[in-house]
Amino acid sequence: MSLVRYDGGMTKPAASSASPTKLALSRHEAAQALGVSAVTIDRLTKRGFLHPSRATRRPIYPVKELERFLRETSPNDYQAPTDHFAGPGRQAESSNVGEAV
């Protein structure tokens, strides 16, 4: 990782051409990733199916937590696409998204 100097003599990481993969998603991003509404995310959290991080003022949903939820609540023969949580504007590599294997 290269560093770039900016005012005040401090350094910050240089911007890379590829955006980093998000480790956690906001409530709305989690809802979009799962294909449900934000209210459904709230209900799943209240019922104990999802466990957000409360390290910030607003809950954030780690991608691994969303994957765990899908794994534990899906039929045994279902496998989620590997790039399901690619983030807004990025498509999953697999063309069979949502199909049972």
Image: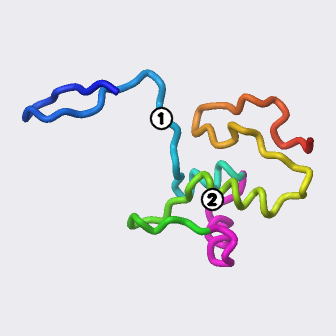
Picture residue at 25% right of the left edge, 27% below the top: 3
Where residue 13 sits, quadrant-wise, is top left
Q: Secondary structure at mark 2?
A: helix
Pick the quarter of the image with the N terminus. top left
Which kind of residue does numbered mark 1 sit on?
A: Pro
The residue range painted magenta reads 35-50
Would you say residue 52 sits in the magenta stretch? no
Please determine whether, in this image, residue 2 is positioned above or below residue 92. above
Q: Position of residue 101 (x, y in %)?
A: 92, 41
- First reached walking from the N terminus: tag 2 or tag 1: 1
Picture residue at 78% right of the left edge, 30% below the top: 94
Tag shown at residue 73: none
Please determine whether, in this image, residue 4 is positioned above or below residue 83. above
Which kind of residue does numbered mark 2 sit on?
A: Glu
> What residue is disc 2 on?
65
Q: How many marks?
A: 2
Q: Position of residue 8 (x, y in %)?
A: 7, 35
> What residue is disc 1 on?
20
What residue occupies the far top of the structure in this picture?
17
Q: CA distance from mark 2 to mark 1?
A: 19 Å
Q: Secondary structure at mark 1?
A: loop
Q: Position of residue 16 (x, y in %)?
A: 39, 24
